[in-house]
């Protein structure tokens, strides 16, 4: 039996939620969030023109977030 999920907050959507059952499913497993502070001068050459670095406590950080999508359909 497939349960239908009802979403009540929809004003931000530019199109209506489909009437039928959900066709996709994904679970995020074995998630790791790893973060390292870096020096601004080391990171700036890698940032495309027009983008700005977001700083935390005056320094940019690099994040790596690997995960396994399972189940995925």
Image: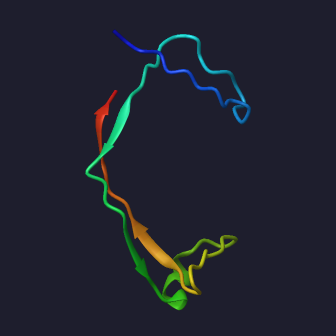
Q: Quadrant of residue 3?
A: top left
Residue 12 found in image quarter: top right
Above or below for 31 versus 72: below
Question: Residue visible at 31% across and 51% down?
Answer: 67
Is 20 displayed left or right of 16 in the figure? left
Q: Residue at x 46, y 19 (%)?
A: 22
- Residue 23 point in image, percent of width and height: 43, 19
Residue drawn where x is 52% and y is 10% of the image: 20
* Residue at 54%, 85% in the rendered image: 59
Position in image of residue 41 (x %, y %): 54, 90
Position above or below: 66 against 19:
below
Screen quadrant of the N terminus: top left
Report whether 60 appears left or right of 34.
Answer: right
Q: Where's residue 66, x and y in %?
A: 32, 57
Q: Is residue 12 placed above or below 67 in the rendered structure?
A: above
Q: Quadrant of the C terminus?
A: top left
């Amino acid at each position: 039996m497939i349960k239908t999920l009802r979403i009540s907050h929809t004003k931000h959507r530019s199109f209506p939620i489909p009437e039928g059952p959900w066709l996709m499913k994904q679970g995020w497993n074995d998630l790791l969030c790893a973060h390292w502070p870096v020096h601004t001068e080391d990171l700036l050459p890698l940032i495309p023109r027009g983008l700005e670095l977001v700083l935390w406590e005056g320094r940019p950080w690099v994040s790596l977030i690997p995960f396994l999508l399972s189940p995925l359909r």
